[in-house]
Image (cartoon, coloured by chain):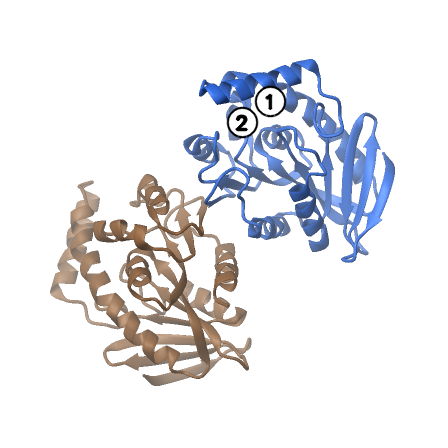
Chain colours: A blue, B brown
Amino acid sequence: MHFTSVQRFDDGVLEREFTLGEIPGTLWTPESAVPAPLILIGHNGGLHRRESRLVARARHSAAYGYAVAAIDHPGHGDRPRSAVDERARADLRRAMAAGEPVDGIFESFVVPLVENAVPEWRTTLDALLSLPEIGGPVGYSGMAAIGIRLAVTEPRIAAAGFFAGGYVPRAQREEARQVTIPLLFLLQWDDEGNPRQRALDLFDAFGTREKTLHANMGGHAGTPWFEVDDGDRFFARHLK
Amino acid sequence: MHFTSVQRFDDGVLEREFTLGEIPGTLWTPESAVPAPLILIGHNGGLHRRESRLVARARHSAAYGYAVAAIDHPGHGDRPRSAVDERARADLRRAMAAGEPVDGIFESFVVPLVENAVPEWRTTLDALLSLPEIGGPVGYSGMAAIGIRLAVTEPRIAAAGFFAGGYVPRAQREEARQVTIPLLFLLQWDDEGNPRQRALDLFDAFGTREKTLHANMGGHAGTPWFEVDDGDRFFARHLK
């Protein structure tokens, strides 16, 4: 893990860009005398890890006392997009505009995204947990598809916040029953393109008893800011 | 309003029993130099206003900085039950045991409960807001049926937390569209006797855009304690 830039903010939060082999990432850490619990932020949809809302969330949670990390998955952010990725996105836009079914197209690129992202997160986790300023346990916050696979394969993930907006492959909808860690499941009630009933069914399917659903009004990008605070407090209950 | 007893706890919270005409109630107030915003706690199902979980919630919210009040509605707690009430409850137990439809029985006693409780709350509100230690604005927290009617008829109610468990008469399900204040709607995912889909439909129906659903696992009485904290913070955002 090589740190390539560093910035310290007025609230004491340290923001460092890093690379780990081919993986580019960002790490936010609080001013703290003791190792901070770690939250991994998973994102999606071609978003950059430096997307402004993601960065604002990360900095807020770091100021609250967490180490927070985000990486760009293959085909996302700083990383090159393959011709296959580009074609799938073009197919998706065309199908959506035409009002055609999109599940098959989503499967074609979210399935490999999950397959590729989870081993990279585990590698990143190894590196992050070797830093003296970061302690366990670890939380995951973000895209459900990657988070489900991570939660069922990586025993160091102790709690997770999943955002219901975003396609969840059939395989992860099945794996949801194997998720037994505490969950906070965040739903936008009128998320365009993400059927509400499918999200409620996914919440129902998770194997854990310690799961809470938070639903707010509005579309995909309308999650209210207070949910960042709620997420921080959720992790405070479980990352001890 | 006559105070009939007073108790001060170690955390500075003052608990006072009062009567207001026929209405018996309890008021919890924080140690505070400034008038505290007020939360009305509505309860139901024959529960006493001194029921232990209700009292624990009220004291917690008072320690957080709110004035909190609960009253016993006609036929509840300290107040005499009519023969009609008793017969309706017996009918309900019999119908539930036999697996028969219960909506008609619920209508027969929740409709008059709402009709009677709301004017009593408004009278109580007049008296409470005349106390120097209590300031506006006002929140309501508890049973949805009473809360919906109160929210659409009493302009001093600025925000509300509704518990989805408990029968909501057809009239209040219709009135839900007229509720335009910020809402926190609390659902127990496997609430015995309270169909989940009906609760989700009610959440959908509320007229306000500022509504949040919190759903947790378990039955009617299983709401986790952290929802009390979440409620306090919800009111902190809206009772300014």
Q: Nearer the viewer, residue B140 or A233?
A: B140
Q: Nearer the viewer, residue A183 or B126?
A: B126
Name the residue carrying label 2: A167
Residue at the spot 72% in from the left edge and 23% down from the top edge = A74
Secondary structure beneath disc 2? loop
Sequence order check: which comes first, mark 1 or mark 2? 1
The picture places residue A226, in percent across and down from the top left corner, at 56, 52
Residue at the spot 81% in from the left edge and 25% down from the top edge = A22
Circle 1/circle 2 CB separation < 8 Å? yes
Left or right of A11? Residue B64 is: left
In the rendered image, which quarter is residue A160 located in?
top right
Residue at the spot 72% in from the left edge and 54% down from the top edge = A63
The picture places residue A186, in percent across and down from the top left corner, at 52, 41
Q: Is residue B206 above or below residue A43?
A: below
Chain for numbered disc 1: A
Label 2 amino acid?
Answer: Tyr
Label 1 amino acid?
Answer: Val
In the rendered image, which quarter is residue A147 located in?
top right
* Mark 2 closeness class: few <14, some 14–19, many ≥20 residues within 10 Å: many
Left or right of B60? Residue A114 is: right
Name the residue carrying label 1: A110
* Mark 1 closeness class: few <14, some 14–19, many ≥20 residues within 10 Å: some
